[in-house]
Amino acid sequence: MTQFVPTEEIVGFLADIEETVAAVAEDMPDHGEFVSRLPPSTPAAQQAAPTPR
């Protein structure tokens, strides 16, 4: 591919991907927020729940 596509075009394409990934990652919740949104019946939510005393 790099033999047939100008370097500037490849760099622009990769920069677009980088911007898209960064924007999507910025909008995603952090791990704790994600787990807190899980239904209580899922194993991950059960493991994250505080243990009763």
Image (cartoon, rainbow, N blue to C red):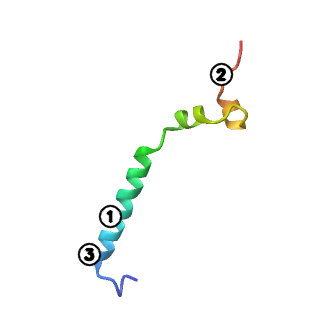
Q: Amino acid at mark 3?
A: Glu
Q: Position of residue 38 (x, y in %)?
A: 63, 36
The residues bearing labels 2 and 1 have C-alpha atoms spaced at a distance of 42 Å
Q: Judge from the rendering whether residue 24 lies leftward or rightward of residue 6; answer left or right.
A: right
Q: Residue at x 43, y 51 (%)?
A: 24
Can you say whether 53 is above or below 8 in the image?
above
Q: Are marks 3 and 2 in contact (CB under 8 Å)?
A: no
Task: Name the outermost residue toward the top.
Answer: 53
Question: On the image, numbered disc 2 is attached to which residue?
Answer: 50
Q: Please give the name of the residue rendered at 32% of the width and 64% of the height, measured from the top-left corner.
A: 15
Q: What is the crowding at mark 3: few (fewer than 14 residues within 10 Å), some, or many (at least 20)?
A: few
Which part of the image, by quadrant, shows the C terminus? Answer: top right
What amino acid type is highlighted by mark number 2?
A: Pro
Circle 2 crowding by C-alpha within 10 Å: few under 14, some 14–19, many from 20:
few
Q: Which residue is mark 1?
A: 15
Q: Nearer the viewer, residue 38 or 44?
A: 38
Mark 2: which secondary structure?
loop
- Label 1 residue SS: helix
> Could you tell me if the residues under marks 2 and 1 are in contact, i.e. CB atoms within 8 Å?
no
Q: Earlier in the sequence, mark 2 or mark 1?
A: 1
Q: Amino acid at mark 1?
A: Ala
Q: Which residue is mark 3?
A: 8
**Residue 42: image x %, image y %?**
71, 37
Task: Determine the secondary structure under disc 3.
Answer: helix
Quadrant location of the N terminus? bottom left
Q: Where is residue 18? Give x, y as percent.
A: 37, 59
